[in-house]
Image: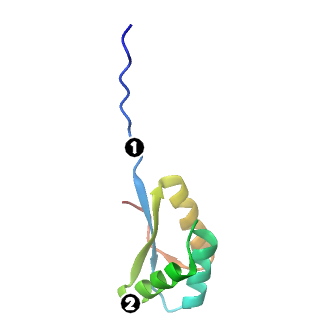
Amino acid sequence: MRERQRSRQTYPNFKVVVLNDDVNTFQHVVECLVRFIPGMQPDRAWELAHRIDGEGSAVVWCGPQEQAELYHQQLGAEGLTMAPLEPA
């Protein structure tokens, strides 16, 4: 009896990127990241908010497409300015 060879195909990960804008406060960005991104701690959210402000954008989460779409939609619904999803 022959064993069937299985090739593990991985799904591509996607980046969730928040863009800088002149509308959202640091506090609002931090609150949204902590509320919607699993495991996001306030200190890390503040670091990301400062990166968004200083560099114009930051990757706030990376992972499977379905979850990335959910977080992207949730953050956008709260008024954050989002870049289009892109493969990591």
Q: Give the CA distance from mark 1 to mark 2.
A: 34 Å
Q: In which quarter of the image is the C terminus?
A: bottom left
Q: Residue at x 51, y 60 (%)?
A: 68
Query: Residue 36's x, y, as percent?
Result: 61, 69
In the image, 72 versus 48, the foreground residue is 48
Residue hosting label 2: 54
Query: Residue 21's x, y, as percent?
Result: 48, 87
Residue 3 visible in the displayed image:
yes
Residue hosting label 1: 10
The quadrant holding residue 84 is bottom left
Residue 24 visible in the displayed image:
no
Q: In which quarter of the image is the N terminus?
A: top left
Q: Residue at x 48, y 54 (%)?
A: 65
Q: Residue at x 41, y 77 (%)?
A: 58
Query: Residue 50's x, y, as percent?
Result: 44, 88
In the image, 15 versus 4, the foreground residue is 4
